[in-house]
Amino acid sequence: MTRSRTAAAAILSAWAACGAAGAEELRVGVAAEPVAIDPHFFRTGPNMSLRENISDGLVYNNQVTGEVEPRLAARWQVEDVRWRFELNPEARFADGEAVSAADVIYSLCRVRNVPDSPGTFLSFIETIETIEAVEPEGEGALTIVTKGPDPVLLESLSTIGIVQAPMDAPLTYDEADCGTDDWLSTQAFNDGSLEAGIGPYRVTSYRRGIETVLERNEGYYGPAPHYERVVLRAIPENGARIAALLSGGVDVIDAVPVNAIDQIYQNEKLALISAPASRLIFFAFDQEGEPSPKIGGTDGKNPLKDVRVRKALNLAVDRAQLVSTTMEGIAEEARGIVMGTVFGAHPDLAPIPHDPEQAKALLAEAGYPDGFTLTISSPSDRYRNDTEVAQAVTQMLAGIGLDVSLETYPQSVYFDRASNYEYSMYLGGAGADTGEGLSQLLNLIHTRDTERGLGGANRGRYSSEKVDALLQEALVTLDAETRRGLLQEAQAIVYEDYGYMPLYHEVAVWAARADVHFEPNAGQLNILYTARPAE
C-alpha cells in the first residue's frame, strides 16, 4: 500500500483525536466562511456551523452519539401530536432576560419571514400546526402541536437557533406572518447591533472575506468552552489554508484537500481528524427551463428533460475514477442520495456503471447523435476539490460527444445564480442536516416549493408526484421501519429517473496542530466549544 493509500485508510477507518494551542485563543482556517451571522438566513454548511456555536436551539442533535440532548429546552414530553417543552431558566440573553416561549414562537415565525434568504429553514417547521405558551408557567414552557405525528421534530428543531423577540407578548403562530411585520433584520445581526441568540460563544467581529471573531459567553448556562476566543479566518484557497497551518498561522483547518493529506499525515506536529460525512456531492440538471440557459445546438429544446439524456450523462461519468484519482480515495462512491450509514439509505441500488458507448447510443436515440453544446457550472471555493471534480466530469462528458465547457464562481455569487435558475447543469452538495435521511430528501428531491421550504436545494427542479407523496407520508409516519421503506422507495424512483447525477459522499477531514483536540462530526460542522488543549 502506498503512503497515500495508508493515509487514506487511516482516515476512513478511525477518527484521530489531538489537543490545543492554549486556552486563550483558537485560530481556525475555514474553506468556506459564513455569509451571515443571522441564524435563520441561509441553510448552508458554513452558516449552520457558526449557528451551532452562537445560537442554541431547543435541543442539540449529537451526530456523534446519535442522541438528542437538552439545550434551551431542559426537558420535553410528547403525547401523540402534542409536544411540551420546559425551558431552562438559567438560559439568558445578553441583557439578562431568560429565554421565554415568546422568543421561541417569534424565532419559528421568523424562519418564514427572512427577506432574501437564498436557502430557507422552512422544511424543518413544515409539520408545526400551532405553538402556544403554557399557563400557569407562562414564559417557562410551551406546547407545539404538529399536523400529524412527527417522528423527527426534535431533530428538525435542533437546526433552528432561538433569538430574542423584540416584543414581550407571544405571537400567535401561523403559517404566514404570525400577525406582525416586526422582523429583526439580517444586517443588524451582521453588524453586531443584535445578538444571534444564546450560545457558548458570542460574535464580536464579523468582517466578510477576512475573519469572524468569537468570544466566550461568560453568562452561558451550559459548560464553558475551553477557549476564551476563537478566530475564524476565511482561507478558501487550499494551498493557502495548508500553508497557514504549517506556518502556525492557524491551529485548525477544515476541508483538508486530498493532495495535502500525505503531507499532514507524515508531520508529527500535525494530526488528521475525520468522520464519515452525510453530504452527497452531485450534479443537478435543469429539468424545467426551455430553452435551458447553458445549452446550445438544440433549437431551443432542453434535452435534460429527456430521461435518456440524463441517463447518458450519468453513464459517461466514471465515479470510481473520481473517487480514486480526483478524491484520492477520500470519498465514497454514491449510488443513491442518502449515505449507507444514515437512516433511510437504500441498500439495493446498483452502482451506476461507466459505459460511454451506451451513453452515445442513448444520445443518438434521443435525437442528439452529434451531441449538443453544454456549459456546466461549479463553485470554486465551497466543496473539497470542487473545481477539480467539475473539470474531470467536463472531460468525461466530452468523451461521449458533447461540446462541453466549465464555468466556476465563488460561492458568494454561485448559489444566488443557482436559485435564479441560471445554470443547466451545476455542482452541488446536500447533507442529512438532522442526522437522518428524511431532511436530506425533502431538501433535495421534493418538488421545489419556496413557500413551504421544500426542495430548497432542488434548483434543477426535479419533480415527481409519487416522490412527493412518499416523503409527505414519511413526515407523519412514526414506525421507523415503515418510514425507512418510504424513504427507500422515493430514492428508487429518483434513481430510475436519473433525476440527479450522484457522484460521491464526502469524508469530513480536518487537520490540527498536535496539541489541539478537535472533535469531528458527520454533519461537517466546526463545533468550536468542544475544542480543548491536549491532555
Image (cartoon, grey):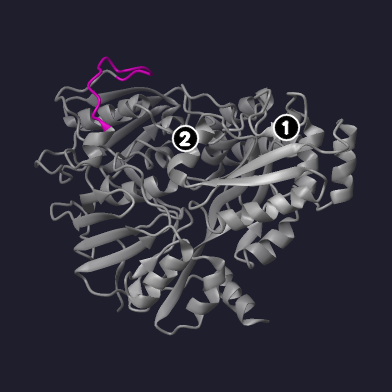
Mark 1 belongs to which amino acid? Gly
**Nearer to us: label 1 or label 2:** 1
- State the extent of the magenta-drawn residues as a range: 173-185
Mark 2 belongs to which amino acid? Asp
CA gap between label 1 and label 2 equals 23 Å
The one nearer the camera, 34 or 395, is 395
Name the image quarter holding residue 373.
Answer: top right
* Percent position of residue 429, x then y: 55, 46
* SS class, disc 2: helix
> Residue at 22% of width from left, 59% of height from top?
223
Give the vertical position of 515 relative to 29 (above or below): below
Queried whether the magenta region covers residue 41, the answer comes back as no
Q: Give the left or right position of residue 47, taking residue 432 as reference.
A: left
Q: Residue furthest top?
A: 179
Mark 2: give few (<14), some (14-19) or many (20+) Cα within 10 Å.
Answer: some
> Residue at 66% of width from left, 81% of height from top?
2
Queried whether the magenta region covers residue 178, the answer comes back as yes
Q: Residue 416: which disc?
A: 2
Residue matched to label 1: 296
Res. 266 in view: yes
> Residue at 45% of width from left, 26% of height from top?
127
Q: Give the left or right position of residue 451, taking residue 28 as reference.
A: right
* Percent position of residue 346, x then y: 68, 46
Res. 518 in view: no
* Percent position of residue 226, x then y: 23, 66
- The answer to whether the residue labelled 1 contacts the one labelled 2, judged by CB atoms less than 8 Å apart, is no
* Percent position of residue 249, x then y: 32, 71
- Magenta part mainly helix, strand or loop? loop
Name the image quarter holding residue 94.
Answer: top left
* SS class, disc 1: strand
Q: Quadrant of the C terminus?
A: bottom left
Q: Earlier in the sequence, mark 1 or mark 2?
A: 1
